[in-house]
Image (cartoon, rainbow, N blue to C red):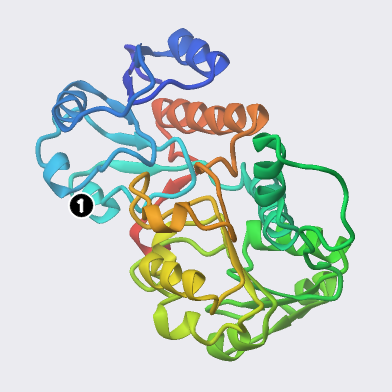
Amino acid sequence: MSSQRLTVVVTRRLPEPVERRLAELFDVELRENDVPMTRAELIQAVKKADVLVPTLNDRIDAGLLAQAGDQLKLIANYGAGVDHIDVHTARQHGILVSNTPGVSADDTADMTMALILGVTRRLPEGLAIMQSGEWDGWSPTQLLGGRVAGRRLGILGLGRIGQAVARRAAAFGMQIHYHNRHRLRPEIEAALDAHYWESLDQMVARMDVISVNCPHTPSTFHLMNARRLKLMKPDAVIVNTSRGEVIDENALTRMLRAGEIAGAGLDVYEHGADINPRLRELPNVVALPHMASATVEGRIEMGEKVLLNIKTFDDGHRPPDQVVPGML
């Protein structure tokens, strides 16, 4: 065990129980306000920290890592995705990287189903009418949506979250289909009653709902590009609770505006908070502010994983959730 307490710098406000426990265990520098660090602040952080605790808003690239002090030995990311961290360069500098996998699968799957229902049942339009005060009573033909039971759901990425989505969708009577880089074991397919498509193009062309649940990697950037989006049926919808970069957002916007895709439910965006205003204003889009994993329980569990990774590292062992380049 270390003879002195680690210096830990946290880049954003975390749930109070997590911050309190960090302060008990380490010499921690907490964020006073809940805004992302500037580049200059990140540079100062990596120069003095033994452990940096960043979030997805922090760009930990080669340029930043080149300015890190020799004492920085662990980047304990608060979140599962690490596409904002140059893991390869960190490894070259002798810096370990850890994340918090598996915590938000159920929360994200819940929100995926909420988006599917929100788009197919036209919830935003109903809310807008009620908030405007213009609703004058029930009508047999008002805001007619579609029933989800019996629809084909194509899951792009049947990992932890994708499988949680499949279980929920099956309870709603949806048919489960999926595409992965590698087919799952037969017993997993059988448990989920999931049909595997080796060809993503063929799956996309036949689904009523597409759910994007794969991580953002160089191979998945714009996986749903303009050509592939055009394969979707005109009455199909697409939801994304994974990473915005997987979908070509401009192409999606054009097709939604033209009625070539029936609707979209989005919790993530290609350029972060810089959302295409034409996409934001569409009535057939349910747009949420990256809140799929935003539960009190989930955020605390993420913090507990960060604590465990740092404490295990401090005790001289490999962090249980270490990320290595070969995993990406």
Q: Is residue 224 left or right of residue 213?
A: left
Q: Specify the quadrant that holds the C terminus.
A: bottom left
Residue, disc 1: 89
Residue at x-position 66% and y-position 78% = 235
Seen from the viewer's position, the closer of residues 107 and 232 is 232
Residue at x-position 20% and y-position 29% = 38
Q: Is residue 296 left or right of residue 173?
A: left
Q: Would you place residue 291 above or below residue 183 in this image?
A: above
Q: Would you place residue 79 above or below residue 7 in this image?
A: below
Q: How many marks?
A: 1
Image quarter of residue 144 = bottom right
Identify the secondary structure beneath mark 1. helix
Seen from the viewer's position, the closer of residues 9 and 323 is 9
Give amino acid for label 1.
Thr
Residue 130: percent from left, percent from top = 72, 38
Q: Is residue 317 left or right of residue 218?
A: right
Seen from the viewer's position, the closer of residues 295 and 7 is 295
Q: Specify the quadrant that holds the N terminus.
A: top left
Q: Is residue 220 left or right of residue 142?
A: left
Residue at x-position 32% and y-position 11% = 4
Q: Would you place residue 158 above or below residue 101 in this image?
A: below
Image quarter of residue 74 = top left
Residue 284: percent from left, percent from top = 59, 61
Residue 54: percent from left, percent from top = 35, 33
Residue 118: percent from left, percent from top = 70, 54
Q: Would you place residue 258 above or below residue 318 in this image?
A: below
Image quarter of residue 153 = bottom right
Label 1 crowd bin: few (<14), some (14–19), many (20+), radius 10 Å: some
Seen from the viewer's position, the closer of residues 287 and 215 is 287
